[in-house]
Amino acid sequence: MRLFRLPLLLAMIAALAGCNFKGVPDPQVSARDTEWMAQVPKADDDPRFGRYMIDDPTGEAPGTIVVDTKERQLYLVQPNRKAIRYGVAVGDEAYGWTGTATIARKAEWPDWNPPAEMKARWPHVQYTKGGPENPLGARALYLYEGNKDTLYRIHGTNEPEKIGHAVSSGCIRMRNIDVIDLYNRVALNSKVIVR
């Protein structure tokens, strides 16, 4: 019996040796973060959309954020040809946005005031104070083209089960723990490329 397990074990070791990614530990969070994130519905974590350090697939400069809307992945480029990869939810085709922007503002547990276009499409949406029931979640990064607000955000979510899907009105949604991690790592004026 042990003879049959040895080749299987060796095959598994060889397969894992070829892996070029590793998990990234959760960031430190505040007491408020812990309390409010506990009130957000739980969702099964799909390992395809986990937070990993990987070889950089983008070729962009360190500090750049690249969102691959087709793959539903966000990459934060690191030095030494590495990147942190996060799973995201993106806008469905009708509302998606692509382009290059910069982060002009960062906010913790931001209030949400849906734009007029969204209110026209969905009259039920309304201003929501920051907190666990707010669609922007734990953090928001506001994307600008020059001095103009694109009205698109990279933000947390109160619907973590939608990570990996094309469901939003164009914004890039992340699990709250992931958007906290990203928020802590990026500076204002960081470049964001959405493909």
Image (cartoon, rainbow, N blue to C red):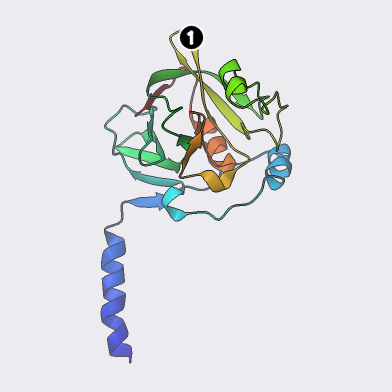
Describe residue 173's horizontal placement relative to residue 11 as left or right. right
Other residues around mark 1 within 10 Å, as few (<14) / some (14–19) / many (≥20): few
Residue type for callout 1: Lys
Please state the horizontal and vertical placement of residue 13, each as a whole percent of the image.
30, 68
Outermost residue toward the bottom?
Answer: 1
Between 9 and 107, the one lying in front of the other is: 107
Describe residue 144's horizontal placement relative to residue 194 as left or right. right
Q: Residue at horizontal 33%, vertical 39%? A: 82
Please state the horizontal and vertical placement of residue 175, each as a whole percent of the image.
55, 42
Tell me the quadrant of the picture where the C terminus can be found. Answer: top left
Q: Is residue 99 above or below residue 132?
A: above
Q: Is residue 35 above or below residue 148?
A: below
Q: Residue at horizontal 32%, vertical 83%? A: 5
Could one spot residue 23 in this view of the protein? no
Q: Residue at horizontal 43%, vertical 9%? A: 146
The residue at which mark 1 appears reads as: 148
Describe residue 114's horizontal placement relative to residue 32 as left or right. left
Could one spot residue 4 in this view of the protein? yes
- Callout 1 secondary element: strand
Tell me the quadrant of the picture where the N terminus can be found. Answer: bottom left
Q: Is residue 184 above or below residue 13?
A: above
Please state the horizontal and vertical placement of residue 45, each as a whole percent of the image.
52, 54
Q: Residue at horizontal 36%, vertical 42%? A: 71
Please state the horizontal and vertical placement of residue 68, each as a whole percent of the image.
36, 35
Between 154 and 121, the one lying in front of the other is: 121
Tell me the quarter of the picture where residue 27 sits.
Answer: top right
